[in-house]
Amino acid sequence: MILSVRDLSIGFRRIGGDLPAVDKISFDVREGETFVIIGESGSGKSLTGMSIAGLQPATSVTSGSIRFKERELLNRPDAELRRMRGREIGLIYQDPLGSLNPVWPVGDQIAEALRAHGLASGAAAARRAVEMLDRVRIPDPARVATAYPHEISGGMRQRAMIAMALIAGPSLLIADEPTTALDVTIKAQMLELLAELQREMALTIILITHDMGVVAEVADRILVMYAGRVAEIGDADAIMRTPSHPYTAALMTSAMISEAEPKQQLNAIVGVAPGLGSFPDGCHFHPRCPLAQDDCRSFVPPLRRLGDVALACHHPVGSDTALMAEA
Amino acid sequence: MEPLLTLDGIVKTFTQKRGGKRDVQAVAGVSLTVGRGETVGLVGESGCGKSTLARLALKLIEPTAGRIVFDGEDITARHGRAMLPVRRRMQAVFQDPLASLNSRMTIAEILREPFDTHGIKLGAALQPRIRELLSFVGMENTDTTKLPPQFSGGQLQRIAIARALALEPDIIVADEPTSALDPSIQAQIVNLLLFIQRQRQISYVIISHDLDVIGHVADRIAVMYLGTIIEQGPAAAIMGSPWHPYTQALLSAAPTLAARRNPEWKRIVLTGDPPNPANVPTGCRFHPRCHLARDVCRQVEPPLRPSEDGGRLIACHLAPEETAEKGRWIGQARLGMPAAATA
Ligand SMILES: Nc1ncnc2c1ncn2[C@@H]1O[C@H](COP(=O)(O)OP(=O)(O)OP(=O)(O)O)[C@@H](O)[C@H]1O
Ligand SMILES: Nc1ncnc2c1ncn2[C@@H]1O[C@H](COP(=O)(O)OP(=O)(O)OP(=O)(O)O)[C@@H](O)[C@H]1O
Ligand code: SF4
Ligand code: SF4
Ligand SMILES: [Mg+2]
Ligand SMILES: [Mg+2]
């Protein structure tokens, strides 16, 4: 186990009580696997990923435990976390424009990742930055290295972010929506590249994405989040083929746009996800769940094992609750 | 269909000041018409000039050459105040919601800004209008005193769409409007865009790398490669039987569920380097990566011409004679049609 997260909670300070955004989630990530986090927009996927990299919003309170290679990461001194970030844990942010410095050429920013960790300096660092840009399939890497972020396309910025995250050779990569701005051919190449690097560098990848095509292609295991909690976690094939949690099932149905008649309404989950501070009692999904019963409104479903997955649901899709054993 | 927005021979050249002052021709002569109430889907490789074209159409940047006509009026030379009445009728939704919303403005301020910019005084009707816009995009219970960094990417994109709808525009240019959203909200936003169109006959230009979304919402699809349109036609024709080898590669890289289940499905892997707009190949721009390329392709640039059946525009020397069969196979396999099993 390269990473163990236990009872991780992230809340935002408010007068009159903190607003929970992530509510006691636990999961393990195995060495060398691709662990994919999917789920509702706003469910806490990015907050979870960022806190593993030691980057919590200033106004948040975090509790629980995050163990990376047997070391506790939570509440470590900032300087130490900074040293690990990039060197041991690479991070690709969700928002590539916001996370690149707008007044600094792209190549210099990538080279800085080497300089900061004392891995190379001066011309050598600059050269390796161009090599890395080439490696992430950027055409004319020497030109792009001298360009400012606003001068390159959205897809190029995303590839530049990938280059920056990997240049110092981390063993864990947290990639938050690394392929959303990429076209399908480059996306396919990028996924191949990540798979290649994964083999070469024994890289473990935590991938956050909304793209079910990508999930189908790369996921070993999947964590499904809904409104700050784990809905379902386990083997990727099992979750994609026969989702047991009603939220996962609805998510998979929504993703089947290609099966719908053009220009007709798509199957979306009814209603909207609860915002921070308005999570309902019991199961957070109950106001939108087609299978909800009385117990769902009052009791939080515990995470239980069901075949190849563990899920938090009183009445899973197509199964008898009595078959479930405590995980 | 009555034309609403016409781009005519648009060129945009950027000059990069460092690294040897090289010119980048991001858009190299594009003509495209968007009809009233029509949805045009714009697809193509990263860096091929889609966003640049969108920004040109919105007059956020100036074309190096070409004409832009909006609702019968040439707006190419219009600037500043003279553009305001047109701006009100053209709105944009961008790829990167956090970057496109001012992070120091509250949600309420962001949503009232379009009214202020255009001198529209709603008075007491403003707050209800803001609520209405938010509920339109599924965010009725939002605390409008919060700032953009306090929302998730998906929530921000919905706010950006609400802002674009504020002035009831005739056209929305949306650059990757759904890629930051989870599949369920993506489906909701697609439904919302379709619903608005049915209600108000609005036109859309939608840029997306998600070919399933484009195939679902677009009436017409234009495929760009390295600054030019290489194939254009009704969505059913482009998705169902792509003729251009690049369009075929694009569709083959995005298998639908049905295609994934087809044991004969193969992804066309493009060999050669991705294109570089600072160094455009001679002849057909796609030739260094095209498996069909021959001498004529290396020497003569194929013009974008109407096909004989009049069903599409195509820029390839060998289409449809040598390309149509493969295109039909890809289209059918993506749709899960039986013909795919035999070809
Ligand atoms: N700095 C912050 N201050 C207050 N609330 C925040 C802050 N950052 C995130 N949140 C809130 O925490 C919740 C979870 O946010 P997060 O960014 O983790 O969602 P996500 O699952 O990554 O969503 P998406 O798929 O849209 O990216 C959201 O409701 C968001 O509004
Ligand atoms: N302000 C600028 N200065 C210099 N070059 C630019 C500028 N804006 C765009 N370019 C270049 O123009 C080309 C087209 O960029 P554009 O953003 O239009 O691509 P795109 O098709 O939208 O790509 P993506 O799918 O990745 O968003 C790229 O090579 C980019 O580097
Ligand atoms: S616990 Fe109840 S409400 Fe929640 S997902 Fe399961 S069936 Fe639906
Ligand atoms: S013109 Fe030639 S090189 Fe270009 S797409 Fe057609 S066959 Fe390929
Ligand atoms: Mg996120
Ligand atoms: Mg773009």
Image (cartoon, coloured by chain):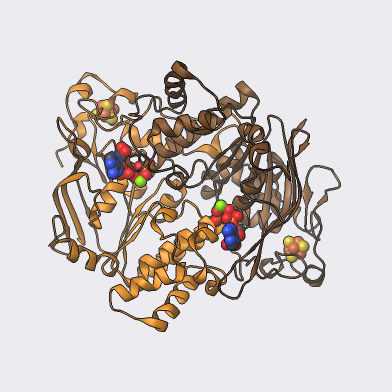
Tell me if I can see residue A94 in this picture.
yes
Q: Nearer the viewer, residue B277 or B221?
A: B277
Q: Nearer the viewer, residue B316 or B75?
A: B75
Q: Compared with residue B167, is residue B303 higher up or lower down, i.e. above or below?
A: below
Q: In this image, A190 relative to A318: left or right?
A: right
Farthest top residue? Answer: B124
Color of chain B here?
A: brown
Q: In this image, A253 relative to A246: left or right?
A: right
Point out residue B307 in the picture as x, y percentages from the top left corner. 83, 48
Tell me if I can see residue B191 in this picture.
no
Q: In this image, B240 relative to A87: left or right?
A: right
Give the tally of numbered discs. Answer: 0
Point out residue B271 in the picture as x, y percentages from the top left corner. 61, 69
Q: In this image, A17 relative to B207: left or right?
A: left
The quarter of the image holding the C terminus of chain A is top left
Residue at image point 54% right, 36% down: A259
Residue at image point 32% right, 67% down: A203
Q: Compared with residue A137, is residue B49 higher up or lower down, i.e. above or below?
A: above
* Residue A315, image quadrant: top left
Q: Nearer the viewer, residue B333 or A108?
A: A108
The quarter of the image holding the N terminus of chain A is bottom left
Q: Nearer the viewer, residue B5 or B193?
A: B5
Chain letter, colour orange: A
Q: Compared with residue B296, is residue B80 higher up or lower down, i.e. above or below?
A: above
Point out residue A36 in the picture as x, y percentages from the top left corner. 34, 51
Point out residue B278 in the picture as x, y percentages from the top left corner. 65, 68
* Residue B155, image quadrant: top left
Farthest right residue? Answer: B308
Quarter of the displayed picture in which ligand 1 can be seen: top left
Residue at image point 23% right, 55% down: A52
